[in-house]
Amino acid sequence: MQKSVLITGCSSGIGLACAHELHKQGFRILAACRKPEDVERMNQAGFTGVQLDLDSPESVQAAAAKVIELTGNRLYGLFNNGGYGVYGPLQTLSREQLEQQFSTNFFGTHQLTMLLLPAMLPHREGRIVMTSSVMGLVATPGRGAYAASKYALEAWSDALRMELHHSGIKVSLIEPGPIRTQFTQNVNQTQSDHPVENPGIAARFTLGPEAVVEKVRHAFENPKPKLRYPVTLVAHALTWLRRLLPARMLDKILRG
């Protein structure tokens, strides 16, 4: 029986690249996108398009019901990849902007996952994989809102992994550093005249979405998936620096 995997944020970048790879590996891909035209594009690409706006509880409810219907209440995998970034100094963010950042990146993910778990738990197998970020490990000036949403996702994923320990469902986090996608172009900047940008040196360590694809494939196919998958040299380096350096010294590096 072909195993079904739902991928959110599937219209481009990491989500689309992983959809093609997992489809190639034999999975049935349910490709969730926010825009109706992207849903249709997913259908034309050989996937099963599902409309989903993570910022809307009603849309999440409808999408989950559609997935359960399409899979006959048997879902093998969920790749929580959808999200976006709000960049700017914290003092420039309104409560509404911060709430929307969490609504899409965290609350919608929680709601969707809880609605779909009943289609996974009875079968005693499955994978739940989250796209976190190096910003889920360290925060930098101007990225506080986005980092906070990813820190929350990291803690939530750790708790979920332990709660599902005896269920047969494995939970993994993907932690990319700089990746060439449309994410940067789609960032919501609170100060358009002073946008938050990656330092020039980051370009040297930026990889394509295929670097994430390799990790996601491992997370879905390996009998013993890793708990965390850092992606790019930046992510690996910051993982170790966070453990080894005094907090004030790490602050100094990240401020620079």
Image (cartoon, helix red, strand yellow):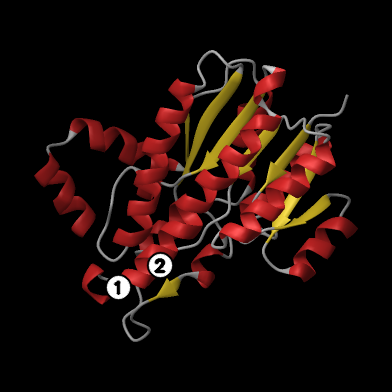
> Which residue lies at the image location 24% right of the left edge and 37% below the top edge?
242
The three-letter amino acid code for the residue at tag 2 is Val
Mark closer to the chain start, 1 or 2: 2
- Looking at the image, residue 209 sits to the left or right of residue 239; the answer is right
Image quadrant where one finds the N terminus: top right
Find the residue positioned furthest to the bottom.
193
- In front of the other: 182 or 10: 10
In the image, residue 28 lies at what x, y percent? 82, 38
Q: Can residue 156 be seen in this view?
A: yes
- Dot 1 and dot 2 residues touching (CB under 8 Å): yes
Label 1 vs label 2, nearer the camera:
1
Q: How far apart are marks 1 and 2 (CA)?
A: 9 Å
Numbered badge on residue 18:
none
The number of numbered discs placed on residues in the rendered structure image is 2
Q: Can residue 178 be seen in this view?
A: no
- Looking at the image, residue 153 sits to the left or right of residue 22; the answer is left
Can you say whether 253 is above or below 195 in the image?
above
Can you say whether 152 is above or below 170 in the image?
below
Look at mark 1 in the image and give the residue it sits on. Answer: 93
Give the structural element (helix, strand or loop) at label 2.
Answer: strand
- In front of the other: 190 or 156: 156
Look at mark 2 in the image and give the residue it sits on. Answer: 86
> Which residue lies at the image location 68% right of the left edge and 27% below the top edge?
120
Can you say whether 138 is above or below 129 in the image?
below
In the image, residue 254 lies at what x, y percent? 23, 54
In the image, residue 229 lies at what x, y percent? 49, 33
The three-letter amino acid code for the residue at tag 1 is Leu
- In front of the other: 65 or 99: 65
Q: Badge 2, how many Cα within 10 Å: few under 14, some, many 20+?
A: many
- Report which quarter residue 240 is drawn in: top left
Give the structural element (helix, strand or loop) at label 1.
Answer: loop
- Report which quarter residue 27 is drawn in: top right
